[in-house]
Image: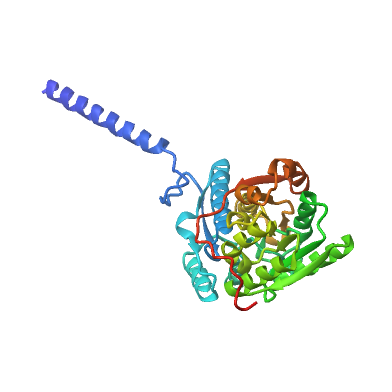
Amino acid sequence: MRDNKRKTGALLCVLFLVLSLCGCGAGSQEISIESEDESTEQHDLYRIGIVQESEDAFWNKVTKSVQRELYVKGKQAGIRFDYKKYTEVADGKRPLIDEIGQDFLDAEVDGIIAIGPLAAKRMKACTKGTGIPVVFAVTTDPLEEGLIKSMERPESNITGATDIIEIRTLLQMMLSADSDIERVGLLYNSENESSRQSMAEAKRYLDSKGIGFEEAMGSNDDEIFSAAYALVEDGVDAVITPADPAVLNSEQSIYQLFIDAGIPHYGGTEEFAVQGAFLGYGANGKELGIAAADLAAEILIEGTAVNELPVQILTLGVATVNSETAESIGVNVDSIRKEFRSICGEVSSTKTAVAAVRQTEEPESY
């Protein structure tokens, strides 16, 4: 009988030990911040809705940077940001963006990061009166766009990071590459308010330098091709385009036209260079994403009021040179890299994305 009791006791001890070991293993396992597990036993949990206005190479980079920085901030603070299943890319149109905003409200997110000016406007509208903080990224002028009333003390529930890149920086790089330029082509969509403002500044700058210019405008592929052809016929020495979506969308239809004429085309986002332009200059997508994520983290982790967080302004961007285009028009990139870096801080290179190239015959409309 005692032997049976001893055996039973021994079995119970073994079972207890096994259960104890299992329990220790589960308790010591860290919850991955990338995981979909929403357990908050070891980590505070914050749900972050991320809405990207539309599919765009630069905005994709900002979104990835936001996600990466949220992961890092969460690890450092010992908390968890749940953002993967709340990241949405819209089609650039208000109805879908509004629908995404309502989805965020239904999911009871703790904060929203809006990438793109329309996304920011709609998230501000849909969160009105809810107390949900909104952080924006990738806006040209948040004051002009009506997002905020003050850069120093924004609205009660919205602040962010903006990429205010002056067109004069692009012009300075143009002149550093060729100080003998006499006539500049200004290629843009006149229906775009931001582009009109940038070109007005460009004209003032060129006037101050005694440099002539020709304006050429279009709002679709055919019009922009005709406008580019006209600048080539006018014999301009270089072409400048601001961060204009219409021209960017048509870049692969016109870049060979400029190459054949030996004319460097400078565009207002780095994606211009990827599409074939000689140089693209724009905000640093990685830094924009970091700044937006850091603001969201400070609001949620530290409890800082949104209107106490000034808008972060990033003024130095990245100059991206298309090495293939540079070689084709006879520009030695190594010889001007130092000058570019002294103006913008960072210089990278790229090659042209593969796509069909439009023939450079004279357009019928010209």
* Observer able to see residue 142: no
Q: What coloring was used for the rendering?
A: rainbow
**Looking at the picture, does residue 19 appear above or below residue 277?**
above
Question: Residue 181: percent from the left, percent from the top?
Answer: 81, 57
For image coordinates 13% across by 20% down, the residue present is 3
- In this rendered view, identify the residue nearer to me: 230 or 39: 230
Task: Report x, y in % for residue 68.
Answer: 54, 47
Q: How many marks?
A: 0
Most distant residue in the left direction: 1
Q: Residue at x 72, y 64 (%)?
A: 154
Q: Quadrant of the C terminus?
A: bottom right
User: Residue 214 occupies which quadrant of the picture?
Assistant: bottom right
Residue 212 location (% of width, % of height): 83, 65
Q: Is residue 28 left or right of residue 329?
A: left
Q: Quadrant of residue 25?
A: top left
Viewer-nearest residue: 289 or 360 = 360
Residue at far top of view: 3
| Percent of width and height locating residue 67 | 54, 51
For image coordinates 71% across by 68% down, the residue present is 233
Considering only vertical position in the picture, is 329 above or below 334? Answer: below
- The residue closer to the viewer here, 269 or 293, is 269
At a point 57% along the width and 65% down the height, the residue shown is 253
Name the residue furthest front: 361
In-image side of 350 versus 242 (left or right): left
- From this view, report whether residue 10 is shown above or below residue 310: above
Q: Quadrant of the N terminus?
A: top left
* Residue 179 in view (yes/no): yes
Q: Vertically, is 174 above or below 221? A: above
Q: Quadrant of residue 266?
A: bottom right
